[in-house]
Image: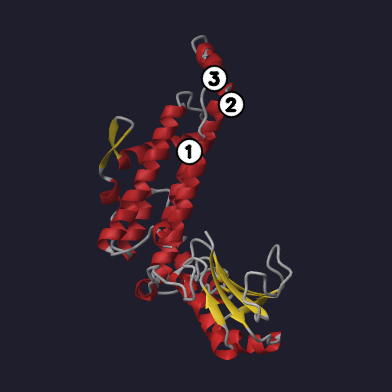
Amino acid sequence: MSIDLYLRCKRSPNARAIEKIIFPLGWEKQEYFPGSKNLSYQWFHRENFESTRGCWLFLSKPSDDDPSDTKLVFHAYSNAGRSHEDVEAQNGVIKALRKAFEGSIYNPQEGKQSYLENDIPKLSPSEKACGFTYIDFQHNLNRASMAVSDISERTQKMMELSEWYATLDVGIVRNNTLLPFLIASLESFLKEFFIAYLETHPDVQKKIYEKKSKIEYSELKKLLIGEKTLAELEADNYTFQNLYSANNAYKNYIDVDIFKILDKRKKVKNQSRVVRDVVVEMLDLRHRIIHAAYIDISLDRSRMERYVSYTRKAGELFVNTFLSEKSFRIDLEEYV
């Protein structure tokens, strides 16, 4: 959903005069916004994850709906998923332009002359950084759930004669390929969340320095040229596909116990199991598929959907720990 704010100006300042006002506010000139031939500018601050979607400023000629004495229209625009800071920048640029060139503002959402009400919570850089990793994780699981396949009736009948026929079924092969993707999604989530947390907590990064008695030249070079951050280098010391290794990383730096988090029983499709047990089962199956060219002929739609659900439960339990113990607001789709 878009959100718009207009300034109907009775003057027509040139680009140089406009840029003198907006460039100090952090706006940058865009060559062309897709679909538009008008001059446009963007505010998108990646530092400390201020922006989640950014916002734009367009200059256009007045339309028939604008007051007759309008000579230039400033249109500040942002998209759904915007951050508190994005909306602040959107309001701020119109305020600055109005102060410099006068004019009347128009808020089409409210149908009146007012600035935008910014009711979006101001999340911390860590909440945003970690929140984005959770959103990516959820998107991966949504993709996985749509890719789950059925086993054909013909294959089920042929399996009664020989299990070999099952290895030729597209549905079975696809599900066996999808299982490693589920594990990779969970691994990536745990690793990227760990990195995001460390990079947005300088006090935690101090623990890395205190732990290192020396740093290898290869690591130092990567730091100096910006190839990797300190948090990324430390994450490389752990294998997040291995729960014991991932747990050590989180316990050492964030004081979070993954085993404790996942040792909870959850019900999925009338079956109640400990989430950690299901994850370990998936890890073992993934290892056999990847390293032994194993095809599990019983990996049907029902079982795969159960695996997707338990992977989702693992992520929910993990995030809930940060919601309760770290006072995080991680579900960005709820807050932005």
- Choose mark 2 or mark 3, whichever is in front: 3
What element does badge 2 sit on? helix
Asked if the residue at tag 3 contacts the one at tag 2, i.e. Cβ–Cβ closer than 8 Å, the answer is yes
**Residue 164, position as x, y percentages in the image:** 55, 17
Nearer-N-terminus badge (3/1): 1
Mark 1 element type:
helix
Name the kind of residue labelled 2 in the image: Val
Which residue is pictured at 39% across the width and 43% down the height?
311
Question: What residue is pinned by disc 2?
Answer: 170
Return the residue found at the far right. 37
Q: Residue at x 50, y 81 (%)?
A: 92
Q: Position of residue 254 (x, y in %)?
A: 32, 64
In the foreground, 284 or 26: 26
Determine which of the numbered discs, if any, sits on residue 152 in the image.
3
Marking on residue 145? 1
What is the spatial separation of the Cα atoms under label 2 and label 1, in whole angstroms?
Answer: 16 Å
Nearest to viewer (mark 2 / mark 1)? 1
Q: How many marks?
A: 3
